[in-house]
Image (tube, rainbow, N blue to C red):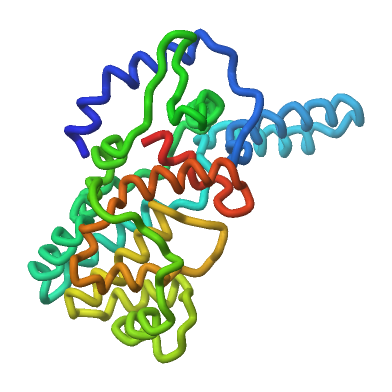
Amino acid sequence: MVSVYNAMKPFWVKTFKYLEMVDPPTFSLGLTASDEEKGNASSSGAEANVQHKGKEKKDEKKVSDKVGKDNDADPRLRHKLSIPKVYDIMQMIEGKTRKDEIVKELTECGFGGMRYICNWTKIPTSFVDWIVKSFEKEHMWIRLTKTKVLPLRDDDVHRVYELPMAGKEINLDLCSDGAIRRLRRELGLGGGSSPRVKVSDLESKLKTIEHPKAWVKGAICYIIHNILCPTNHSGVSLQYAQILEDPAGVSSYNWCSYVLQYMKEGLQNPIVANPLADFHFLM
């Protein structure tokens, strides 16, 4: 991840310089107001209220303290993704008795790069907002200037997440109830064929599971839910069960193409994925 950052550093520098020359974004797709923006709004409203009503000094100080606290807050991206959750799950591997086998299985599945994901929580909201505004879906590129664009391709996803970028197309409609039942049994989730499991329940199971294949299957579902393809649904999808038991292996699928297409569809359909795509744009 460090090498990726260093390689792309010139681009970030140029982009931030460009941002200084353009008007700040006036809309937000899948983003709520940042803490800083809320603080500024709160500040203006509080000051106007004090002038209008002529509050006593004690009340004015109370409002001022609150505004100061809000303005000191760092802007944060509001999204359905949780990098820290995946980071914590990856740290679990260190305490597993069969650590080496788990690492090997995770790598063979093509998800080994997730072991090195950064615990990133603070993101420049206005920057992502600008990227979303500059994205042209029909061409799958980000427009930097009138003559320059930054295309988004499968290999871009691969450079960031190190996922497999060649192979079969992922189609969740092919997942059978039988595959879901088998996965639930492997993960210790009991019988039934419910295609979803509570995040907290899966986290609890991942803490206790020691069998490498079962742990990696659960971790992949968790990673997809929290980073790659999150939705507004609170449950983790188990509809990848068919893929996870494919004899050809999980790495025989084009995960990069799947993530890129999901990102594109997420922007087009806010009901399904509202703010999920923004983080992929930033990456």
Which residue appears farthest toward the right when viewing the image?
A: 53
Q: Position of residue 36 (x, y in %)?
A: 58, 32
> 141 above or below 106?
above
Image quarter of residue 91: bottom left
In the image, taking residue 157 as reference, residue 282 lies left or right, namely right
Relative height, residue 20 to residue 192 (above, below) = above
**Residue 9 x, y percent position in the rendering:** 27, 22
Q: Nearer the viewer, residue 208 or 130?
A: 130
Q: In this picture, is 16 found above or below 230?
A: above
* Pick the front one: 254 or 39: 254
Q: Quadrant of residue 63?
A: top right
The image shows residue 44 at horizontal and vertical percentages of: 75, 26
Residue 213 occupies quadrant: bottom left
Assign the C terminus to one quadrant of the image.
Answer: top left
| Residue at the image position 31 percent from the left and 40 percent from the top | 157
Could you tell me which residue is drawn at 36 percent across and 58 percent down?
Answer: 170
- Residue 190 spot, x, y in % from top left: 40, 90
Q: Residue at x 40, y 72 (%)?
A: 175
